[in-house]
Amino acid sequence: MMKLSALPSAVTGEQIPSTPSSNRVVLILDLLERVLVLVVYAYFARTFIMSFIAHPSIFLVPLVFSETLPVIFILCRAPSAEVSRSPLDWILGVAASVMPLLAIPASGGQHSTFMMLTVVFCMLFGALLELAAKIVLGRSFGMVAANRGVVTVGPYRFLRHPIYAGYTLVHVGFLLSAPSIHNAVLYVATLTVQIARIVREERILMRDEAYREMAARVRYRLVPGVF
């Protein structure tokens, strides 16, 4: 993890000396991220309750646990050593977290056995993948691009961003269960934002030698053989 005595500039990437002022900025940004996480989680809780009342589903149970756990991690973690000061990184982090909540559940309809099995696999495996990655990441989890320590165990042995891979699988499963132009456009936009988020995150993480070594071992970020 990078030391506070050598915080990089978010704009130029140059090393700048740590000062009381710069340390205060990091603490303020860290606090702001926690507030945003609580706001997003409140919106998620509201969306979940409405969806569960309208369309009760067993798949929503692991989803709630998976989304609640990182909130607890974030609230209990120590202040981040480095948080991005780029407005774009904050926009991407919030957008990627909120956009999937705008998907519209299916109002009914029949699906083939094969389609239902595909939906179950995508949503269940995706939820388990992101949950396992969140547990391994622990209090290093965050919504905004930052270096909170490099994790190389568990799902991170196979993908550099297994949480986002799990999200993507869940989104594919949800889209197959509730196909619509609205949901298709929403999830394509979400994936685009997620990819941009990964690229921006790695601009910070690649400054860390431990992450560069991990990236050399783990070739793919999101989808094996593709990206």
Image (cartoon, rainbow, N blue to C red):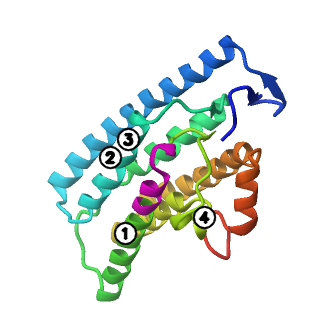
Q: Vertically, is 6 above or below 51?
A: above
Magenta stretch, residue numbers: 131-141
Q: 154 or 224, which lies in front?
A: 154
Which label's residue is closer to the chain start, 4 or 2?
A: 2
Q: Picture coordinates of residue 108 (x, y %)?
A: 22, 68
**Tags 3 and 2 in contact by the CB under 8 Å rule?**
yes
Which label's residue is closer to the chain start, 3 or 1?
A: 3
Q: Amino acid at mark 1?
A: Met
Q: Residue at x 19, y 59 (%)?
A: 55
* SS label for mark 1: helix
Q: Which mark is residue 123?
A: 1
Q: Which corner quadrant of the image does residue 43 belong to?
A: top left
Q: Which mark is residue 222?
A: 4
Q: Amino acid at mark 2?
A: Thr
For disc 2, the neighbor class at 10 Å (few under 14, some 14 to 19, many from 20) is: some
Q: 108 or 61, which lies in front?
A: 61
**Residue that numbered label 3 is attached to:** 71
As drawn, is 175 to the left or to the right of 95? Answer: left
**Tags 4 and 2 in contact by the CB under 8 Å rule?**
no
Q: Picture coordinates of residue 132 (x, y %)?
A: 42, 62
